[in-house]
Image (cartoon, rainbow, N blue to C red):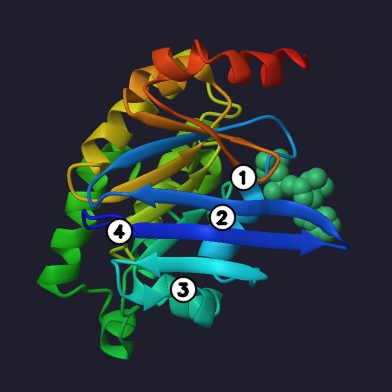
Amino acid sequence: HIDQPTVLYMDGVSVSFDGFKALNSLSLFIEPGEMRAIIGPNGAGKTTMMDVITGKTRPDEGTILFNDQHDLTRFDEAQVANMGVGRKFQKPSVIESLTVFENLEMSLKGGRSVWQALTHKLTSAKQDKIDEILSMIDLKDRLYEDAGSLSHGQKQWLEIGMLLGQEPELLLIDEPAAGMTDEETMKTAELFKELSKKHSLMVVEHDMDFIEALDCRVTVLHEGSVLAEGSLANVKNNQQVIEVYLGR
Ligand code: ADP
């Protein structure tokens, strides 16, 4: 056990697929309000780690605690999401035939009431929430356009906005910069820094320029456990990390 409070506490977590250890006694801690980047070569266990945190995969052994109290291994995906752990997959899943506004409206915690659906009016609290999200994701001027007309980067931001509608405390985000232009990538880094003022974030990413821009603590996974942890400059100079990335 460690002394400081954590939003995510993983200790000795293992997962095997047909005898192959995708996670091998993984231990990793994230402090409340922290942003953490996760890197590692293909097959390192990054996706499996997100799967065990979010209740998609049950670990064979180990502890996973949310806010030092909820044992996440006892809940399914929907329950974990309800507790305040939001996950964004790599591919955006916005509904392209609905407007930006409609996508956001749908995502709000508590959904839309029958009255709101009939009158097309949102409660002022929900309108405020949408405004708050919109200023974060910078899509105010695209509000009434179909999500399908957005650029790839804008779709990713919209989907992050939709996650925010669920009011998550911890956000798990898979390769947000993949497929983005350099400009979108840097804008996304700024968005994440803004998000980290209110949320804890775990960001799996390969793009080193993006990670550098995030300017946060980095964890390197390899063969299902933590190989190195520290600043990007620090882990980049780690001999074991260099060997893993260069393939020895
Ligand atoms: P990463 O996301 O870092 O690329 P993954 O977590 O996807 O790594 O995979 C870790 C290892 O576990 C890989 O060798 C992968 O082939 C294996 N693996 C992942 N999921 C399954 C599964 N459902 N069945 C069998 N093997 C799996």
The earlier-in-sequence mark between 1 and 4 is 4
User: Is disc 1's CB within 8 Å of ligand 1?
Assistant: yes
Residue highlighted by disc 4: 7
Q: Residue at x 69, y 29 (%)?
A: 41
The earlier-in-sequence mark between 3 and 2 is 2
Crowdedness of circle 4 by 10 Å Cα count: few (<14), some, many (20+)? many
Does 96 sit above or below residue 76? above
> Which three-letter amino acid code belongs to the residue tagged 4?
Val
User: Is disc 2's CB within 8 Å of ligand 1?
Assistant: yes
Along the viewing direction, whichever of 69 and 75 lies nearer the viewer: 69
The earlier-in-sequence mark between 4 and 3 is 4
The earlier-in-sequence mark between 3 and 1 is 1
Residue highlighted by disc 2: 50
Q: Could you say whether the residue bearing mark 2 is in a helix, strand or loop?
A: helix
> Which three-letter amino acid code belongs to the residue tagged 3?
Leu
> Which three-letter amino acid code belongs to the residue tagged 2?
Met
Residue 246, can we see it? Answer: yes
When asked about the image quadrant of residue 203, the answer is top left
Q: Could you say whether the residue bearing mark 3 is in a helix, strand or loop?
A: helix
Q: CA distance from mark 2 to mark 1?
A: 7 Å
Look at the numbered discs 4 and 2 and tell me whether their residues touch, using CB distance below 8 Å: no
Does 185 sit above or below residue 242? below
Residue highlighted by disc 3: 72
